[in-house]
Structures are given as C-alpha cells and as structure tokens.
Image (spheres, rainbow, N blue to C red):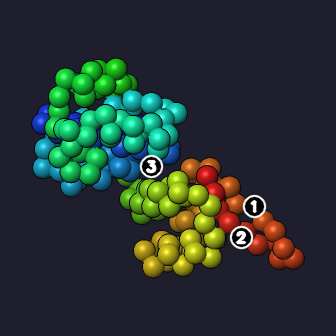
C-alpha cells in the first residue's frame, strides 16, 4: 500500500505492506518529527514499482530520500487519497512488535529470506523468537515447513 505523510511544507511518498506496519510507521514519524503530520492512504494495492514511479515523477521536488517539497501535483495526489487516523489498539502502540513487523516487512519485500538469517538478525536487533513469530503472523508471512523435523527453511510474503 502506498501512503502519504504531510507536514505542510513537505510530503513523503512511502510504501507499507500492511495497515499494521503502516500504523507503526505513522507512530514513528510522529515521534521523530517536530511538526504535526497528517497521513493519507493513496493505494491499498500499490506496489514498489508504483511508489518508485511516483518518486521519479516528483524527482524535481525531492528534498531528501522519499520526502518532497509540496507542490500542486502532490496536493492533487493528497486530495485523491483516503485520510488515515493514527489510533493504536488499546490506546497505545505495541512498539516492540510493531518495530518487528516493520523490520520483517521491509526485509521480506525484497524476496524470500532464510529462517535462520531472520532469527539471527532479529535477535541482534532485540526481537525474541515469539515476537518475530507474532510479527510474521500479523503480516501473513508464509513459513512452509520441510525436512524430517518439519523445520521452516524460508520466510516470504
């Protein structure tokens, strides 16, 4: 899904695989930004290629990374997008799980990854095996089992 974040002067065109990871990103951007941010969902089914095409189309307005100076073309996109409200379940974010979801989603958007690599890198980042499993369930990670011990070999979206 493709989302937009706007603070008045700048707008971000971003990609998230699920609404759960989008909610985490919204929480993170709000904490790390001194300005009030608004969010909109541009496309529920948008993929990386569509996001990159928008980045190229707006390249002359790029400030840094995925952030662009607001202009009439971006405002038209903004007006066509669905407003999003950043409300976490039970009133507060589950930051560790949401961080694991965001990290896992970013990793798996690039393609399948060995389960052992995910566990090793996840542990290095401070995520327990349970947290990684719950994060995987939340975003619908495919974890087929194989072999004599029915071990998961590869994770993918």
Give the number of callouts.
3
Image position of 103 (left or right of 91): right
> Residue 144 placed where, x, y %?
75, 61
The residue shown at (25%, 40%) is: 59
Helix, strand or loop under label 1: loop
Front of the two marks 3 and 2: 2
| Residue 38, position as x, y percentages in the image | 24, 35
Image-based side of 73 in relation to 116, left or right: left
Question: Answer yes or no: do the residues labelled 1 and 2 have beta carbons within 8 Å?
Answer: yes
Quarter-wise, where is residue 142 in the image? bottom right
Q: Position of residue 121 (x, y in %)?
A: 50, 75
- Left or right of 108? Residue 12 is left
Q: Which is nearer the N-term, disc 3 or disc 2?
A: 3
Q: Which residue is mark 1?
A: 144
Residue hosting label 3: 21
- The location of residue 120, given as percent across then percent down, is 54, 79
Q: Which residue is mark 2?
A: 153
Residue drawn at point x = 32 percent, y = 45 percent: 26
Q: Which residue sits at x=32%, y=39%? A: 56
The mark that comes first in sequence, 1 or 2, is: 1
């Amino acid at each position: 899904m493709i989302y937009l974040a706007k603070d008045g002067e700048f707008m971000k065109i971003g990609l998230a695989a699920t609404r759960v990871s989008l909610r985490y990103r919204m929480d993170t951007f709000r904490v790390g930004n001194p300005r009030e941010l608004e969010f909109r969902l541009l496309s529920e089914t948008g993929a990386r290629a569509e996001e990159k095409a928008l980045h190229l189309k707006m390249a002359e307005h790029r400030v840094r990374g995925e952030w662009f100076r607001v202009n009439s073309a971006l405002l038209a996109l903004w007006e066509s997008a669905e407003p999003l409200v950043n409300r976490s379940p039970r009133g507060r974010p589950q930051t560790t799980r949401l961080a694991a979801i965001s990290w896992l989603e970013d990793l798996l958007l690039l393609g399948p990854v060995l389960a052992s690599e995910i566990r090793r890198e996840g542990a290095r980042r401070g995520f327990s095996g349970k947290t990684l499993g719950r994060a995987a369930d939340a975003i619908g990670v495919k974890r087929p089992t194989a072999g004599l011990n029915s071990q998961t070999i590869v994770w993918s979206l």
